[in-house]
Image: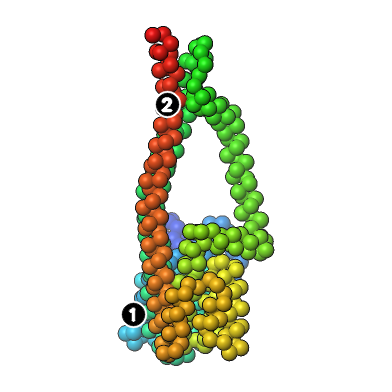
Amino acid sequence: MSAYHFVAINREGQEQKGVLEAESEKHARQLLRDRSLIPVKVKSVDTKKSSVNSSAFSSITKSRGLSSKDLALITRQLATLLSAGLPVEEALGAVAEQTEKARIKGLILAVRSKVVEGHALASAMREHPQAFSSLYAATVAAGEKTGHLDKVLERLAEYTEQQWQMRQKLRTALIYPCMIVLVAIGIVGFLLEYVVPKMIAVYANLKQTLPWMTEVLISISHYLRDYGLYTLLTILLIVFIIYRAIKSSDRLREKYHLFLLRLPLIGYSIRTANTARFSRTLSILSAAGVPIIEAMTISAQLMTMIPMRKAVTEAVHRVGEGASIHLALKQTGYFSPMSIHMMASGEASGQLENMLERVAKNQEDDISRLIEVGLALFEPAVILLMGAVVLFIVLAVLLPIFNLNDFTS
């Protein structure tokens, strides 16, 4: 059986959308009629076999990825059901019934239909790379081979939940600083748009030399009024051109990544985040029974920085030639001495998976501390900067008045 998206009309004339399982499109239409629904559109969830041109229908058939939250929830539910002894196809069906999102339900049913046909779960997931990454599919495949799929899914659930919690923590922490910046920009914009022009009109009739701060403020106000929009559009256009150039050229993107890695604080943060991702992924894959060369190759591909990815790929080749893992990674220059020593200890004691997990946790803790410290410093810095800007505007407005009073007295 396969999964089908449908759009149908009920007895009240209302449109309904959803997902159902059927042996064919004709069977799906018959099932809808049995439910007293008039089928309008019925298309297979399998995007390789269906081509939909209707804009009203493409929104639910479009193959999109899963969010970290949705993926973590699905993985946790699958692990729980498999631990309870349910077969894979029944567990997938139960998870599909549990979800209320038609897109996710259709995705799970599409995977289930492949499993029912005899495909392995990992093979079915690989047909939806937007939803299930290479790490996810490779780990599931290893779990199937070793017969510990439930335990592997539990580790994957923990990994995806940690990633989601980290993103949520960062987004929550950024709300207050962003609000401060927006309010400050609004205040400065109000002063420059309404207060300064009126000030200019008042000072135009004064036959006295204005203070330099006032002259600068008037010049800024004139420039923003005459060329502000053009300047903003030009900046946005330049940023867009640079972004498209970097995105379309691997050579430029590699140079850009190399530039970021060389920055003092940003480079350290990026290296730490990628080291944590590599170590966590390698730990999961190794514990699942994936061969070390294949595990390192998959882990390297998940690194976001091209120079680091290339360096680790070269390290994988050295490991394949007989070098130890920690020495090969040490030669890349991107892993901290503490991480290298912990990996060496893991190799010597035969507990590489546990040490890699500790490395990942240490690096993730470092990232959390960097974020906390950065935000703690960012908030007062923004307040001081915007306070200085507002003070400059206020002084530029009031100084001519003070000078006028001194002149008349």
Between the residue at mark 1 and the residue at mark 2, the CA separation in whole angstroms equals 65 Å
Residue at horizontal 66%, vertical 60%? 252
Return the disc, 1 or 2, that comes first in the chain's sequence: 1
Q: Nearer the viewer, residue 194 or 321?
A: 321
Residue at horizontal 43%, vertical 80%? 342
Looking at the rendered structure, the kind of residue marked 2 is Leu
Residue at horizontal 40%, vertical 55%? 374
Residue at horizontal 40%, vertical 13%? 406
Question: Mark 1: which secondary structure?
Answer: helix
Position of residue 273 measured from the top left corner of the image (x, y, whole percent): 47, 67
Looking at the rendered structure, the kind of residue marked 1 is Thr
Mark 2 nearby-residue class (10 Å; few <14, some 14–19, many ≥20): some
Position of residue 288 measured from the top left corner of the image (x, y, whole percent): 44, 85
Residue 69 visible in the picture:
no
Quarter of the view holding residue 407: top left
Vertical order, 192 against 55 (above or below): above
Question: Mark 2: which secondary structure?
Answer: helix
Which residue is labeled 2 in the image? Answer: 395
Which residue is labeled 1 in the image? Answer: 80
Q: Is 293 placed left or right of 109 in the picture?
A: right
Q: Nearer the viewer, residue 389 or 36?
A: 389
Q: Nearer the viewer, residue 15 or 400?
A: 400
Position of residue 322 measured from the top left corner of the image (x, y, whole percent): 58, 90
Quarter of the view holding residue 384: top left
